[in-house]
Image: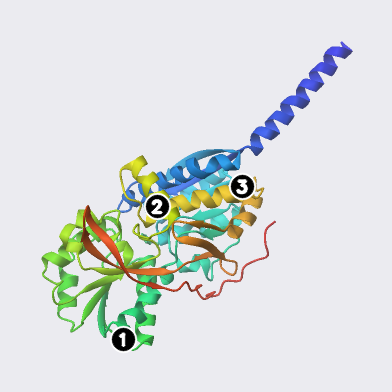
Amino acid sequence: MKKTLKAALAGLAISTAMSTAAMAEDIKVGILLPYSGVFAALAQDIDDAFVLGLETFGPEAGVTFDLVREDTEVKPPVGLAKTKKLILQDEVDVLIGVVSSGVLGAIRDTVDGAGVPLIVANAGNDEATGEACSPFITRISFSNQQVNRPMGKWMVDQGVKKVFTIAPDYAAGRQMIDAFTAAFTAAGGEVVGQEWPPFQKTQDFGPFLANAKASGADAVYVFFAGGEAISFVKQYDSFGMKADLPLYGSGFLTSSLYVNAQGPAAEGVITALHYVPTLDNPENAALVAAFKAKTGRIPSEYAVHGYDSARALVEAVKAGATDRASLAAALPKVSFTGPRGELRIDPATNNIVQPIHVYETVAGADGLTQKVLATLPAEADPVNGCVMPAAVN
Ligand code: PHB
C-alpha cells in the first residue's frame, strides 16, 4: 500500500513536471488579420511569410508555436471582439497582426490593459507608438509618418512645387497625408487641394480625379492600398492624368503584391517604402528565393512584416521569454539583420527605425519592377507624446 502510494506520488511528480515542461514549450500565438475585405491579399501575404519565418527560424527556439487565426474583416469593432476572444478564451501568449490603423486604434487599450504583447505586423497608426504607446506594443512594420515624411522634402528637391492629395478617409489616410503635407510645406511646397474618398466604399474615383485635374497642381500625392490601390491607379491612367500630372505616393500604392494587376497604368509612378523586393542584400535574396518557392510570389512589404515578426518572436523566445510578461519585455529588445537590413526598435516608442527607399515602377524582364531612385536615411519618429512606462519584467 505504502509502496503503491509512493509510486503514485512519484507518477504525479513526473506528470506535473511533464505538464510544466509542455507548457513552457508551447507558445500560443493569436494571429489577427483581415482575411476578408479590401486588405485580404495583404493578410495572406503577411500570414504566408509569418509561417515561412517560423519554419526558417523557429527550430532555433526549441519550442512549439500554436497558431490561432481570427479575421478582423478590416472592421474596428470586429477586430476588438476577436482580440478579446484570443486573449480571454484562447489565452494566447502573444498577438501578431493588424493591418488597419483603425483596428489598431480600437484594440490598443485592451491589449495594454490585459498585458498581452502585440507585434504589429502592418498597421502604421502613429498614435500606437506616440501618445498611445504601450510597453506591450512593438511595431516591426512602419509608422504612417515614417513612410511619408521623407517624400515631402525629396519631392520639393525634384522641383515639384504644387501638389493635390487624395487618400481614403480613415486614420491611416489622414496620418499619411498629414505627415507628407507637413514636410512638403516645411520644405517650401504648397498643397493646393485635398480629397478624402470614403474608405472601402469608393468604386469610382472620377469626381476626385476631376478636382485634382482642375486644381492647378504639378503633381498628385496619394495613399491607397490593396483593392483600392488597384482601381485608383487604373482609373488615374484611364482618365489620361499621368501625362500632365505625375502620380506620387506612399509605396503601398504600387506594392509588388498587386502592381502586375495594375499593369502599364503603374509604369512611371514614383512612391516610397521601407522595403522593396529589389533590395540587394543576402538576407533579402534568401527571403525572395524561399517565398517564391513556397508561394510562387515575390515577397512584398507585407510579406516582410510577417517574416520579420516571426523572426522577432523567435529571437524573444531564444532570449528566454516564455509567457506574456517575459515576451513583452523581450520583444522591443530584439535586433537582427533581415531583408531590410539591420532591424532596430526605438526604446522611446517601440517603433522600428529604418531607411525609406524612393522607387519608380518600371517595366522589367518579368513584368513590372521597382527601381530605387534614392534611399533616405533612417530617422526615428519624434516621440509624439509617448511616455514609455518602465519595462514590464
Ligand atoms: C493602415 O491602415 O495602417 C494601413 C493599411 C494598409 C497599408 C498601409 C497602412 O498598406
The type of residue carrying mark 2 is Ala
Give the label on residue 285, or none. Answer: 2
Ligand 1 visible in quadrant: bottom left
The span from disc 1 to disc 3 (Cα, nearest Å) is 47 Å
Q: Name the residue at 32% across, 65% down.
A: 251
Earlier residue among tags 1 and 2: 1
Please identify, in this view, whether the residue under mark 1 or under mark 2 is nearer the observer. Answer: 2
Closer-to-camera residue (5/378): 378
Residue hosting label 1: 189
Please identify, in this view, whether the residue under mark 1 or under mark 3 is nearer the observer. Answer: 3
Q: Are marks 1 and 2 in contact (CB under 8 Å)?
A: no
The type of residue carrying mark 1 is Gly
Quarter of the image where the C terminus is located = bottom right
To which quarter of the image does residue 90 belong? top right
Mark 3: secondary structure: helix
Q: Residues within 10 Å of mark 1 (few under 14, many from 20)?
A: many
The span from disc 3 to disc 2 (Cα, nearest Å) is 25 Å
Closer-to-camera residue (99/183): 183
Horizontal relation, residue 89 to residue 38: left or right: right
Q: Name the residue at 40% across, 69% down.
A: 356
Horizontal relation, residue 339 to residue 233: left or right: right
Earlier residue among tags 1 and 3: 1
Give the label on residue 317, or none. Answer: 3
Earlier residue among tags 3 and 2: 2
